[in-house]
Amino acid sequence: MFKKLFGKKEEITEVVLKAPLTGKAVDLAEVPDPVFSEKMMGDGLAIEPSEGIVVSPVDGEVVQVFPTKHAIGLRAENGAEILIHIGLETVSMKGEGFETHISEGSKVKTGDKLVSFDIDLVKEKAKSTVTPVIITNGDALSSIEKKPLGAVNRGETPVITVIK
């Protein structure tokens, strides 16, 4: 009983990422950019979004917000580092059509809105809307298990289980 009152907080080792966007989850191999398809940044999956809202896939902390607002770095409670890269070659848009709802250091819960973006503008100005969701520190984790691909709903559909 006293351990619960005075003991150390239990370490979280397993985290289930929920889809950060609504759309269709696809294999990284299908992403038309070798940086992602060849897993140079890490393992994960990608989502073909059907709307322009990105939410946090985990409870954790925002560790990076790119100045162009097209990518967000998160750290889950078990230490997994997650990169959400909205679209391909979107850095050239210089933030046009993107709005962030968080900042570096923000604590987030699964489903909290991170970024909204103009999906039609991204379709027009970028190479693709496909959004890689990458575990960038997989070598520091014991396992990354991807769920079946297909239709996903932001903040609800489990997509990856990460074990420290």
Image: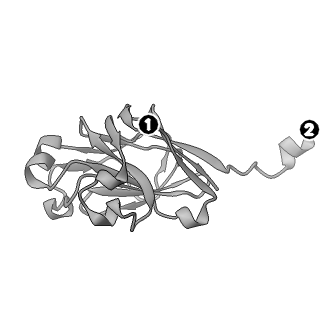
Label number found at residue 120: none
The kind of residue tagged 1 is: Gly
Whether residue 68 can be seen here: yes
* 40 or 126, nearer to the observer: 40
Q: Residue at x 40, y 63 (%)?
A: 39
| Image-quadrant location for residue 112 | top left
The kind of residue tagged 2 is: Met
The percent position of residue 109, horizontal first and vertical second, equals 50, 41
Q: Residue at x 46, y 63 (%)?
A: 136
Q: Earlier in the sequence, mark 1 or mark 2?
A: 2
Question: In the displayed structure, does residue 134 sit left or right of residue 52?
Answer: right
The percent position of residue 76, horizontal first and vertical second, equals 54, 52
Decide: marks 1, 2 in contact (CB < 8 A)?
no
Q: Residue at x 29, y 51 (%)?
A: 30
The percent position of residue 127, horizontal first and vertical second, equals 15, 56
Circle 2 is placed at which residue position? Answer: 1
Circle 1 is placed at which residue position? Answer: 111
What is the CA distance from the residue labelled 1 to the residue labelled 2?
33 Å
* 90 or 112, nearer to the observer: 90
> Callout 1: few (<14), some (14-19), or many (20+) C-alpha neighbours within 10 Å?
some
